[in-house]
Amino acid sequence: MNGSTCFIWFIRVLLWKFSIPGDENHKWVTSAKSDQFNGEEEKMFVSGIFQMYYDEVRKAVETGDWTGADEHLGYIKTFQKRFGAKIYPSDSKINLEITYNKLNIFKRLSMYYGLIGFILIVLHFINILRPKINLRMVIRISSVIVILLFLLHTAGLVIRWSISGHAPWSNGYESLIYIGWATILSGLIFVWRSEITLAVTALLASLILAVAGMSWMDPEITNLVPVLKSYWLIIHVAIITASYGFLALAAMLGFFNLILMNLKTKTNVERLNLTITELSYIIEMTMVVGLFMLTIGTFLGGVWANESWGRYWGWDPKETWALVTVLVYSFVVHMRFIPGFRGNFAFSFAALISYSSVLMTYFGVNYYLSGLHSYAAGDPVPVPTFVYYTVIIVFVVGIMAWIADRKHKSITT
């Protein structure tokens, strides 16, 4: 078998797919399996069309006339549409997917969220440190822009759902863009208590979508693996991943509080203490919502596991770390009842570092441990460099905030 023949065989086996007429499972096979077709006419077409197409392509390369090649390609498409109509995507869906890919909605949103989130954070810092400067109108306009971006984000998820035919949180990439959506939603829910939440969630959503756009994440729209072909995909996965967005808001507000603690001076300590206390209340509320959703989602995951694998709990890495995350946040929510853990610093710092259990549940299990979940193959992914820098920054800011908090005797809860 020479190189040309080997290449042709490779293309025939892997690329060309034909629908078997009347098959109850709508099975598609390669031209190499033409013997599975009952009709003689279909057998001859499937077994011979590729060679005819290849001959026409070779002629077109020499003559520059692609009419014959296009005509034979049309025969293949007609055959596929005729016998595979029930699963062959409509022209409108194909055009929608092409438009979706060209728009690259979520990559653009990452940049837009980041820009407007940074602007809002700066405006809020100025407003906190220099309250005499009136920035109310600018902040409101920026907040409206975030809401418009959220609507675009929602439209992107709906479009992806329409194209794929299933809920857009079935793999690593999709769950990230959905968590980004849930993060903005959490900011919109609590913005009535503090406008800072929307600024924080915009920045956080930008980071989440940026991670989703990394090279090791696959944005391709694919079919569901068998275990995910269940209504539990919409219920269990939607609830438990949405909880990550609320818990992420708590973590970011905790980090924001630590920064404010470092900015205390004798002249602004009272004003900053009030802001920190206000944000601590929001952290507690959003953490309670996130913990409630996480717990319910974990129980629903057990029900799905029983349907899929015949048991409610099996100490699979994903199940184990979901339980660990529930226990971690249960402790943090109840810290105010423990002497020595009642201060705003302890609560804010705990809200921030507790999110590492979520990251382990989501990234660590999915990409570093082997389990029963669809994209938790256990194939190691290089740890991004920014992770190490993030850990260092968190602990440096935390230590400095602890020193500043003790120095200015911040009020306790």
Image (tube, helix red, strand yellow):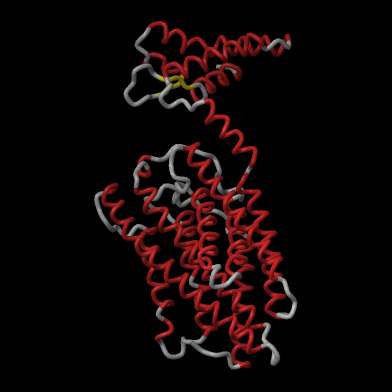
Percent position of residue 85, x then y: 43, 21
Location of residue 316 with respect to 152 vertically, above or below: below
- Please tell me in which quadrant of the rendered image residue 403 appears: bottom right
Percent across and percent down for residue 328 are: 41, 72
To which quarter of the image does residue 260 belong?
Answer: bottom right
Q: Quadrant of residue 42?
A: top left
Q: Look at 50% across and 74% down and name the residue there.
A: 283
Instruction: Compare residues 272 and 307 and report the one nearer the observer.
Output: 272
- Give the farthest residue toward the left: 310
Q: In this orientation, which residue lies closer to the viewer: 78 or 50?
A: 78
Percent position (x, y) of residue 363?
49, 58
For the residue pair 53 and 204, the one nearer the viewer reads as: 204
Looking at the image, residue 298 lies above or below residue 394: above
Which image quadrant: the N terminus?
Answer: top right
Q: Is residue 189 left or right of residue 34?
A: right
Residue at position x 44%, y 56% in the image: 369
The location of residue 412, given as percent across then percent down, is 51, 89
Number of numbered markers: 0
Question: Farthest residue toward the right?
Answer: 133
Instruction: Please report the residue visible at 39 percent of the width from the left and 53 percent of the height from the top.
Output: 371
Is 336 left, or right, of 256 in this rendering?
Answer: left
